[in-house]
Image (spheres, grey):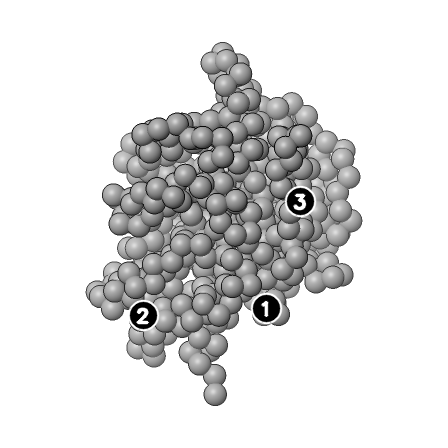
Amino acid sequence: MTSLADDTRWLDATDQAALVRNGEVSARELLDAAIERIERIDPALDAVNIRWFEHARSVADGPLPDGPFRGVPFLLKDLWSHFAGQTLSNGNQALKDAAPVSPTDTTLVARFKAAGLVTAGRTNSPEFGSLPTTEPTAWARTRNPWNTEHSPGGSSGGSAAAVASGMVPIAHASDGGGSIRIPASCCGLVGLKPSQGRITLGPFRDESNLGVELCVSRSLRDTAALLDAVHGPGVGDTVMAPAPVRPYLEELGAPTGRLRIGLLDHHPFGAAIHPECADAARNAAALLESLGHHVEAAFPPALANPEFGRRFGAMWSTNMAASIARIAAQLGRELSDDEVQLHNRAQAQFARNVSGVEYAMALAANVEFRRAVQQWWADGWDLLVTPTLAEPPARIGEFDDQPDSPMAPMVRSAQYVAFTPAFNASGQPAISLPLHTTADGLPVGVQLVAAYGREDVLFRVASQIEQAQPWIDRRPAI
């Protein structure tokens, strides 16, 4: 006889919500099933680093909002996502030790609650979300459910490992340089980075930032339904994506017409990429051609400009310095060297050597880059297809700090994430789809990129692909 934990393990959030809505199970029963799975599976993965199970049970037992995901168990990434009455560590030892309690929700967390989601705790993140792996020294290393010798990616690696292993059907994720798409690729999930300004970052963060937030999931319909539930500006936002013309759920299965699609199957700077990743992109392109689209080798020329990495690095490192300063202000004291990981200290130090004029020039250069990249779509292209990553999932330990080379993890990261940061800088929506598996059984994602504000196009085309090459039944053995 199977338990409810087993019976619901591989149902997506839409199906789990239907069970509650139809009265077949209660929200408390769904939550207890998820908690049972977390307690059984997580010791091998270390994906869920902060647990508030009793609080979640009290929420599930109470009156839940009648949202589209009423009663569905959920996990929140341990990075900048304040949940009133709970702690947040950002993967940092000083915050973990101090354990300050958030006085209020972020606007997005409030919208998750209004959608009916029942949050059971937090998922592991690298310190301040700076690496494409999830191995903070403040917490345990998170492992990939497809092969625990490998990383689930980062920075939303805890969320991806939890969803891929069936602990919960959907989990919060954020993306400042690929941190939704990277773990989606590593764990065989759907990972949509929305357009900049599609979802508010209020009240604490600014939409002109490189980062955006949403989720990782196993099905397109879950991602579309959650975006329908939480999109839109907040008070004081200055960057706002154009409103969709209809719900994103209605884009699934909608006709696309014949699209003009470019394929980038090599490193934009000419460096080597893994053959499995190139094959993944080429196979996706062939599938799109078979579905009636026009595909040719083409991509925005601006992506091949090596100056982009330097500009992105200046902004990224300055954001890191600001993050550390913000935590110091919150704690009322400076952070010591042993409270911040070496690669993040090195980035902050680099930022201190960047003058205000140099940073302003980097911002101006990014505006130039954004316009140059988006021009390619304005010139008549509908989509770009790339590998999500330049390599299959990295092994645990590949991004460890090296005392004699403080920036080594960042250099390694730049090689690994060749295809994702550009679209944080350009602000465009991009989605990673689980379309390839290596010979040794590791997931490899394919990235689709649309024009700014055109998540609708991504959902239509991704839906075609999902129907032609379904992935929902692919499951890790763990």
Residue 193's spot in the image, x, y percent? Answer: 50, 45
Residue tagged by mark 3?
398
Residue tagged by mark 2?
27
Tell me the residue at 53%/36% (across/down): 341
Residue 257's spot in the image, x, y percent? Answer: 58, 51
Kind of residue at disc 1: Ile
Q: Is residue 341 left or right of residue 447?
A: left
Work out whether 193 lies above or below 336.
Answer: below
Question: Nearer the N terminus, badge 2 or badge 3?
Answer: 2
Residue 438 visible here? yes
Name the disc covering residue 478, or none. Answer: 1
Q: Is residue 250 left or right of residue 63?
A: right
Label 2 close to label 1 by CB (< 8 Å):
no
Tell me the residue at 43%/50% (across/down): 77
Q: Is residue 222 left or right of residue 275?
A: left
Work out whether 13 lies above or below 195.
Answer: below
Kind of residue at disc 3: Glu
CA neighbours of label 2 inside 10 A, class few (<14), some (14 to 19), many (20+) = many
Quadrant housing the C terminus: bottom right
Q: From the viewer's perspective, is the residue at label 2 or at label 3 nearer?
A: 3
Dot 3: element:
loop
CA neighbours of label 1 inside 10 A, class few (<14), some (14 to 19), many (20+) = some
Kind of residue at disc 2: Ala
